[in-house]
Structure formats: structure tokens, C-alpha cells
Amino acid sequence: MKHNIILVGYMGSGKTCVGEYLAKRLSYQFQDTDQLIEKKAGDTINNIFASCGEEYFRDLETGLLKELVPLLTHTVLSTGGGMPLRKENGALLRELGLVVFLKASKETTLDRLRGDASRPLLQGDGLEEKVENMLGLRLPVYENTAHGTVVTDGRTIEEIANSIMELYEDVKEAPTGAERRQA
């Protein structure tokens, strides 16, 4: 397995905060797929969604992953919340390295996302219903894509990072790869 840690999960699960911390701790690079797409497209995610639609954005995600597979090494990669929804993307993410699902409860997610206007899929009224519906669809995808799951509710960034490191060490030592685990 490549020496990368790929963080998947819903918006507000802690992928960026935990990813930055973990990268520093490992002396790895930190990359965020949404930031990479914005840089490459020369536009914001919100504008891409508004002008070209979600399907176009998902195409950009797949293209980015295909570019990263041969290049990415010693990196913690934070992914957009919808990236694993395409089956092809899930396979590409697993090819990149250890995929860890950062899982937060609906209540934790709502607390973290209230007032955040930067999320195009959460615009308008009915935040709780939108989050509940998307979590219902996405949780099984995250679980099937990831090598392991780390629950983030009520835990510090350091505690979450320690759990990820345990999974990472297990995978590096396992001859056939990682079994699904929850930490």
C-alpha cells in the first residue's frame, strides 16, 4: 500500500483539521482535493456548482484522482464529502493509500455546519433535513470505501489522529492489507 492516508467523510467530520494535524505529525504533505480543484479550475467550488452543476464538479474530482494516483506519496489527503459517491472514485481512493472514514453523528455535524455558507449542497432552508438525507445516502458509501472508521464525536484532534495512526500501522504490517476496523 502507498504511504498516503486518505480521509473521507461528510462535511464537518474533521477531515481538514485532522488531516493538517496528522500531516505535521508524520512529516507528510497535506492536500485537500477541493483546494486542488479550485486551483486547477481557477474558480471556487460554489461557483463551479452554480455555473456548471454537480455532475461537472464530480467529473473534475475523478480527473484529479486519476492524476494523483501515480504521483501522490507521503501525503495526507482530505477529500470532498461527495468524492467517494462514484464507485470509480472509491477504487481510486483505495489505490492511493489507507482510506479512513471520519464519522461524526448527525448532531455533531449540525453543530459544526450551522452558519457555514461555503457548502453549496447545504444552501437554503432545511439544513437538518438535508444533512439527515445526505448522511443516509453517504454513510454506507463511506463505510464501503474505507479500510477503517474513526468516530470523531467528543474527541480531540490528537485522539482522532492516534486512532488513525493505529489503523495505519496495522495496514503497514498486514501482508494482505487492512481489515475493516472501527476505532
Image (tube, helix red, strand yellow):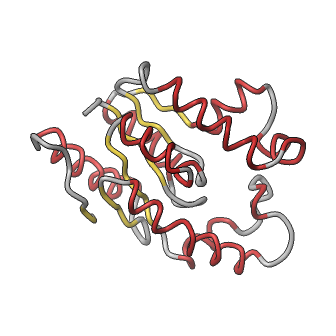
Q: Residue furthest top?
A: 71
Give the number of marks: 0
Q: Where's residue 160, x and y in %?
A: 35, 57
Identified at 79% across, 78% down, the residue is 126
Residue at 42% across / 20% down in the picture?
A: 70
The quarter of the image holding the N terminus is top left
Q: Nearer the viewer, residue 78 or 56?
A: 56
* Quadrant in the rendering for residue 5: top left
The relative height of residue 142 versus residue 95 in the rendered view (above or below) is below
25 sits to left or right of 103: left
In this rendering, position of residue 42 left or right of residue 24: right
Name the residue rendered at 36%, 23% in the picture: 73
Q: Quadrant of residue 148?
A: bottom left
Of residue 151 and residue 149, the one placed in the foreground of this image is 149
Q: Residue furthest right?
A: 51
Q: Position of residue 100 (x, y in %)?
A: 37, 52
